[in-house]
Structures are given as structure tokens and as C-alpha cells.
Amino acid sequence: MTAAVDPANLHFQSITFRGQQPGPKLIVSGAVHGNEACGTQAIRRVLQEIDQGRLAITGGLVTFVPVTNPLAYARGERAGDRNLNRNLGPIANPVDFEDRIANWLCPLLAQHEVLLDLHSTRADNQAFAMLGPVNNDGPLQPFRHFDAERAMARHLGVQRFVDGWLDTYARGVERRLARARLTGQAANPLNTDPRYGVGTTEYMRSVGGYAITLECGQHEHPSSPEVGYRAIVNTLAFLGISNGQTPQEVKQFEQLHMYEVHDRWHADDQFSRAWASFDRLAKGDLIGTRHDGTRVEAEADGFIMFPDAKSEPGNEWFYLARVER
């Protein structure tokens, strides 16, 4: 049952520490989704160590946001009024609670250079980091910090990296619009806007920084807060913000590239089995069946990502990824 929470009584909180020496400006966020508490727990553990003098902030600046979405967090649900991690940007005329978060959060992100955003997943997968694009001057997501972002990722303590999110989402939007034109159906203004794929990390890159989403593990798994804690401590040391020991670089890792998204077209579209992210696919494997009997098969060897058996028709059903060599 959803807890009774009055949004008007909630506030936004950030805690900032500045070292005596020059250095980068890092922001660490948790609970962008309210049912993903591992980041909040990890941040509060680091704050306690700073307060107790066991971890010193010696250079640059770090801001911690333990609970980015206090309404969703108070309810223990993914979202308050809507998903904060979609279509993120300042809102001239805020309507819902997430609009008001955005008008506080986006300027805060823009004051920093690096973002580490801590999340967790429904599936019991190993931790993985979502990364941005290669350096480019394109219209969708221009970027110039590829090397710095990858270097930071290799010092988080995880061994699986995934990129290609926003490009793949945008291609899905193009096909969604084409299908709407073909069928004569009205297009949903939200999921037919490429900006709907913009969340915290994408927004951070849009204002000149770089950013990593770290999926720390399954929501309730006891190891997930530890993964988040270690990633924060490693990042602080790697960037020269803390006096911690410089972490070792991960040499053996798996790099995946998301390249395709398939929408659910009809409520009777069904998966062939209960898929989970990172389940392996061989070319020709049956992924699901459309309501008219059309088979949806894997077009190449790779992995399924973010399968959603409960997605609404016209929205993402699953993504495909392949090993990036």
C-alpha cells in the first residue's frame, strides 16, 4: 500500500564538502527512483565516515544527494508523480513533483563536472555501469569526455559496462513515429520525443560534464549498498578529492553496446519465456510472439536488456545489446 505522504511537506537536500586543494567538482546521487535505496545507504555511510574523520575531503568539491526524489522514496516506489529519470530538464511551469525536483536538481548538476548516479535493478544481475557515447559533435548528445568517463568507470570496482542508451532510444522513437503514421494512430507526445530518453547522466553531459549510472545490483540484495559505497570511495580517491588510497584499475571487463529496441505493439504480445537483462541470445532465438502470431527472433548473437513483460503497448518491450570489441 502506498504511504500517505504530503508532497508539500517534503524538501530537497544536498551536502557539499570542499577540499583545500584544487580539484574536480563531483556530485553523487541516490534514490532517483524511490525503491532503489542502495545509493542512499551508500552515501550515508560515506557521510558518516567523513563526519567521524575516517575519510578526508582534501581537494576539489563533492556534493552528496542521498535522496534525489523524496516523494518516491517516502512511498518506497519507483516514481512519485512520474519517472524523474525521463525528459529531465528545467521546467518553466512545473506541474508535478518531479518538475519541481528538476528545477532544483538541474542547476545543481550544472554546477559540477562529474556525476556518479547510484541505482539498482529488479533482476538479480551483477553490478554494471551505464556509460555515454564516444566523442562527437552530433545533434543528439554531443560529448567530449569519452576518455575521462571510461577511466573513471574502470576504477569503480565493477566489470561490466554498457553504452548506447540514448542513440538506441532515439532510433526507437523514429520507428515509433513511422508506425504511428502507417497505422494512423495518434503518437504519444512523451515516448515519441527523443528527449524523453534524457535522465540525470544525459542531462549532465548536455551541460558539459560527464556522468556514470551505476546499477549496484538487485534492489534488496545486501551486497548492493556495498557496491555503491565502494564506488563512491574509489571515485573520490581516483579524482583526487579524498585522501583515500587510489583504487586499482579493472583490467578484465565486459563492454556491451545497446543497438536496438523493440516496442510492444499489442497487449497480447508475449515473451517466449521470463527474460532478464543480460540473458544471452543466439541468432534466431525466439524472444517473443506478436498478437498476430509473428515471431520476434534475435537478429544476432548478443544479450537482451531491460525486458518488460508489463510494458504498455506503444512503449519499449526490450532492448538488444552486443559485445563491443
Image: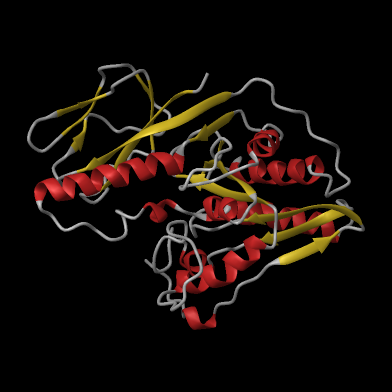
Residue 67 at x, y percent in the picture: 59, 63
Of the pair 107 and 219, the residue shown nearer to us: 107
Task: Identify which residue is drawn at 86% across, 38% down.
Answer: 245
Question: Which quadrant holds the N terminus?
Answer: bottom left
Residue 84 at x, y percent in the picture: 46, 61
Q: Is 218 above or below relative to 68?
A: above
Please tell me in which quadrant of the rendered image residue 287 appears: top left
Q: Is residue 57 something that shows in the picture?
A: no
Left or right relative to 231: residue 8: left
Task: Identify which residue is drawn at 57% across, 63% down.
Answer: 68
Q: Is 250 above or below relative to 193?
A: above
Task: Identify which residue is drawn at 70% across, 58% down.
Answer: 112
Please tell me in which quadrant of the rendered image residue 250 appears: top right
Left or right relative to 256: residue 152: right
- Number of numbered tags placed on the structure image: 0
Of the pair 153 and 69, the residue shown nearer to us: 153
Of the pair 192 and 250, the residue shown nearer to us: 192
Residue 263 at x, y percent in the picture: 25, 42
Residue 98 at x, y percent in the picture: 46, 69
Left or right relative to 17: residue 220: left
Q: Is 262 above or below relative to 7?
A: above
Q: Is residue 31 something that shows in the picture?
A: yes
Task: Identify which residue is drawn at 55% across, 39% down.
Answer: 136
